[in-house]
Amino acid sequence: MKKYSFFLWFTCTMLGDNTTTLHNYLWANYNHFSGHNDQARTWYKEIFATKHSPYVYKGHLYLLDSSQEYAAITALIPSLNKKFEKDPEIQLIFANALEKTNHIKEADNHIIRLSQLFKTDSEITLRASQTYMRRKEPENALLAIESFLNNTPRRPHNFVFHFLKTQIYLQLSKFNDALNSINACLELHPNFDKGWLLYASLCEKEGKIKQALSGYATFLEHAPANPIIEKHLCALTLKYQSTHNNNAVLLSNTITIENALTLFKQQRYPQALMHINSCLALTPMDIECKLLKLHIISAMQDFTQVEQILTEWITKEPDTDIWAQSLYLLTHHAIPRIHAINIFNAIIKQVKNNAWLNLYCADLCIRDNQTDQAITCLNNALICSLDNPLRIKTLYQLSLLHYEKGNYQLMLNHLENAYALNQNSAHINNALAYYWATKGKNLSKAHSFIAASLNIDNTNPYFLDTHALILYKEKKYTHAQQILEQLEHHNNGTMLLHLAQVNYALNNKEIADNLTKKAHVLVKNYHEKKALNKMELLLASK
């Protein structure tokens, strides 16, 4: 709507004192924005029947574009192109109309000319880079993207251009440049699932297996269920852990292990188990053999034996997290989550004060919506010996769970304990800012905490969202709107609802309604659903 109000003001300015034309033009635009395109066309016919300024065509072109009357637009290009040569929005309409009417070459040339004129326009740059790639000119696509990035401020939504650069570098077999670009992409958009998948595959290709494992795991956290990637992560983890921890023993048992692995791949599990047990009889501390045995009995769905052997191994090696981590990773492939949780809980009862057992179990419980059990496990972990970074993360996760349950005082207690350990943690400061802006009702404190977060990272979308919420609470709606509009592309339910609330406060009811509908399919937790319901009731009452 902001775009339309600007071109309406601009065109009215160009029309000068022709009040009849101005009156008709205002009505044409009013009907267009209201969705009454037939009435809008009637008003434009009245304008065109008399002497008129060529600038009235701006609104008319928007009408034709929204009505998909592309042939009518292309017919107007020769007479209007010069008049609107410095208007990127109209020029994009021209390019789109040429493409839709199958004038592909003309459309491509038009976009490339625009990219040279409007180097800071994101949509034109995106279209130009796609055009160059279609023409098999990847170097020119890179130049267009670099020109845009070098001439514009560092903004969160620029992540898409770094993602495109990564794909282009891959085509050019420049893997190191590709890895640098995908890192830049993820810095701007840390929740971009496709970015994490590309990062992981690049790291794996470059032999950086530990980073690849982290990338695949992060992808699975942000993306819908993906059995193929889950299976690949399990296989890669097995390979990494065995070679990383026991290279020397691996060489001495290669043949027996290979036989067991072959039988395992053939799903001949009893035979595979017999082979691996023989191997373990000779080398009972062989990490690779133990991991393969764990995979075999998990594939056999023998959860009782999984519990027994893990209890034994964890008891003998209480200071390593490899066995707890292995059980956790098997939930991506071989063991249903609920069975893994039951196994974890059974082992926790026998193996006291093991932080990793409790932390991995808590994570699975959170994913399975077992909030109370997750809280119990995290509290157990806090009793154990944890380094400060891990203790801070545990306290932070506990605060989020208590927020979900409405235990706001416990939420604050955990956040303050974490803050005492590290006052420079951006996420702890952000959570404290959110608490004081909402439940704590102290906007002065909220401002001080969010300022600390933004001082550390002023591009993080969650920190920016909290800042916008504080501004909204202060009734600084326009400033909040400016921030939230930059976050809209993240398709985050909370951010969209905050933007809907701001637009509602600014009396932009139609925009608020559209944002609320968009958020409807994205909301996840109780608080988001509550905010969505409140927003829907507000809109329904008007």
Image (tube, helix red, strand yellow):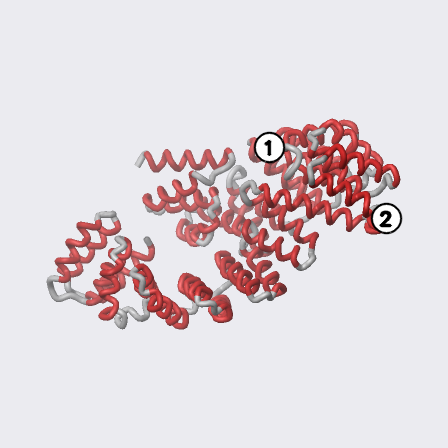
Judging depth in this view, the residue of 139 and 122 nearest the camera is 139
Dot 2 surroundings within 10 Å: few (below 14), some, or many (20 or more)? few
Q: Nearer the viewer, residue 252 or 151?
A: 252
- The answer to whether one can see residue 353 in this image is no
- Residue pictured at 59% horizontal, 52% vertical: 452
Position in image of residue 532 (x %, y %): 43, 37
Task: Provide the secondary structure element on which disc 1 rests.
Answer: loop
- Which residue appears farthest toward the left when viewing the image? 50
| Dot 1 amino acid type | Asp
Residue drawn at x 47%, y 66% as measured from the top left:
152
Q: From this viewpoint, which residue is outermost toward the right?
A: 282
Left or right: 402, with 92 as reference point: right
Q: Residue 524, percent across and down?
A: 50, 37
- Type of amino acid under label 2: Ser
- Label 2 belongs to which residue? 252
Q: Is residue 249 left or right of residue 294?
A: right
Q: Nearer the viewer, residue 266 or 415?
A: 266
Residue 16 percent across, percent down from the top left: 19, 66
Q: Which residue was labeled with disc 1? A: 368
Real-space CA distance between mark 1 and mark 2, rounded to the nearest whole angstrom: 42 Å
Left or right of 272 in this view: 164 = left
Residue closer to the observer: 111 or 71? 71
